[in-house]
Amino acid sequence: MIVQIPSILNPQQIAHCREVMNRANWVDGRVTAGHQSATVKDNRQLPENSPEAHELGDMIVAALERSPLFITAALPLRVFPPRFNRYEGGEAFGAHLDNSIRQIPGTPYRIRTDISATLFLSAPETYDGGELVISDVYGTHAVKLAAGDMVVYPASSLHHVNPVMRGVRLAAFFWVQSMVRDDGQRTLLFDLDMAINKVNQALPNHSAVVELTNCYHNLLRRFAEV
């Protein structure tokens, strides 16, 4: 399931992100890549333990907690601290898969990466290329969103970032361990929740909304691992 989530960050937060990132020191993105990914990764990242990464990451995690659509789509159990990347001058990231398990830096904890997320921080008209291209059973999907918008998709998906040939592409990326590990089950719950919202809007306070909500939570009880 690929879901676009608008307006995770507001314009003031986006401007602050760019200001902090423009004065930060960047390192080769391969420092956090596995052996296979390192052969196709050509970008730069904020050092994961830098003050800038911590500040902006905390802001994004707080914003995620205020997004009903993110909560519905991801059913998050744990969120990996956001990382930040920069592409320009033809930089790209070739086809790769994300690691299935990741150690949270500075802690003894690991997360299972059920969901990958990319939060766009540059306006799409300011750079050429840089599309996130996700492959699934229905083909390939090129994603290039407005600044502040985010896409979430199964971390098991093969994906790549097209070369950035003009301008600068700034983004945050991270992973989520969901309460529901199976993407098909998460999709079923997401579709049901969206349908419940539509019924509630069309027929406010209708008894069917309570009955459907009961079905949703009974399915969540069956699928969830907490």
Image (tube, grey):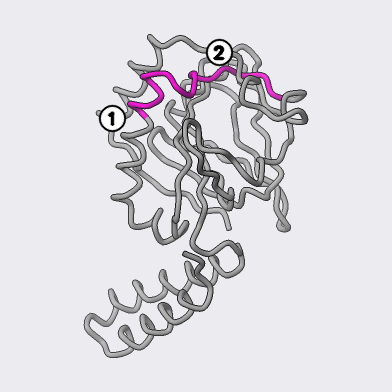
Q: Amino acid at mark 2?
A: Val
Choose between 141 and 189: the one closer to the eye: 189
Choose between 151 and 34: the one closer to the eye: 34
Mark 1 surroundings: few (<14), some (14-19) or many (≥20) residues within 10 A: some
Which of disc 2 and disc 1 is earlier in sequence?
1
Residue picked out by circle 1: 13
**Foreground mark, 1 or 2?**
2
Q: Amino acid at mark 1?
A: Gln
Q: Which residues are magenta?
A: 41-56
Q: Position of residue 156 (x, y in %)?
A: 67, 50
Which residue reaches farthest left?
Answer: 205
Q: Position of residue 155 (x, y in %)?
A: 62, 48
Q: Quadrant of residue 184?
A: bottom right
Q: Quadrant of residue 54?
A: top left
Residue picked out by circle 2: 27
Indicate yes or no whether the magenta region holds residue 50.
yes
In the displayed structure, 90 sits above or below 225; it is: above
Q: Residue at x 44, y 56 (%)?
A: 77
In the displayed structure, 221 sits above or below 190; it is: below
Q: On the rendered structure, is 28 left or right of 208?
A: right
Q: Residue at x 27, y 82 (%)?
A: 203
Which residue reaches farthest front?
Answer: 108
